[in-house]
Amino acid sequence: MDIDELLDLEHQGWKSLCDGTGGDFYGSIMTADGVMVLAHGQVFDRTAVVASLNDAPPWRTYEITDERLVRIGDRDAALVYRGRAYRDDEEPAFVALMSSVYTRAGDGWKLALYQQTPVPQPG
């Protein structure tokens, strides 16, 4: 298990959120019972994630920093990082601490849990 593998999946996910294909990407990578715990206080299952991303405006750009791998077992790991994303020039950046828990499925990885904790921005 290598941090670069999971970091590559996170970048693929963020790129899909930027190019408008997030619903397809997360629909295929999430486990059947996977969930996302989002900054606005909602918990979405895979079906709700796909539906919400199909209607969401794309992100313009994003950054991933301070990433670290937390090994959970032989077939499971969490990637924890600070994410910063921008929709347009007028909106402030969305900044959150993010955790993605992956499980090995066959020869690839599946996303079982994604969680966001917003980081308050100075005033």
Image (cartoon, grey):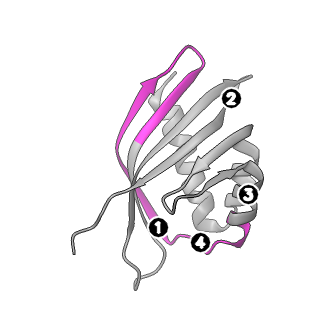
Q: Residues within 10 Å of mark 4 (few under 14, many from 20)?
A: many
Q: CA distance from mark 2 to mark 4?
A: 26 Å
User: In the image, what residue type sits under mark 4?
Assistant: Pro
Q: Which residue corresponds to the image point at 44% horizontal and 62% vertical from the top-left? A: 62
Q: Which residue is mark 2?
A: 108
Q: CA distance from mark 1 to mark 4?
A: 9 Å
Q: Is residue 11 left or right of residue 20?
A: left
Q: Would residue 111 be counted in the magenta stretch?
A: no
Q: CA distance from mark 4 to mark 3?
A: 17 Å
Q: CA distance from mark 1 to mark 2?
A: 26 Å
Between disc 3 and disc 1, the foreground one is 3
User: In the image, what residue type sits under mark 1?
Assistant: Thr
Q: Which residue corresponds to the image point at 63% horizontal and 38% vertical from the top-left? A: 111
Residue 54 at x, y percent in the picture: 73, 67
Q: Is residue 64 left or right of residue 111?
A: left
Based on the displayed image, in which of its 4 quarters is residue 91 positioned?
A: bottom left
Of 122 and 10, the residue lying toward us: 122
Q: Is residue 31 visible?
A: no
Q: Is residue 120 visible?
A: yes
Query: What is the secondary structure assignment of the residue under circle 4?
Result: loop
Report the quarter where the C terminus lies: bottom left
Q: Which residue is mark 3?
A: 48
Mark before the other along the chain sequence, 2 or 3: 3
Q: Which residue is mark 1?
A: 61
Mark 2 touches mark 4? (CB < 8 Å): no
Which residues make up the magenta segment?
Answer: 53-80
Mark 3 touches mark 1? (CB < 8 Å): no
Between disc 1 and disc 4, the foreground one is 4
Of 82 and 116, the residue lying toward us: 116
Mark before the other along the chain sequence, 3 or 1: 3
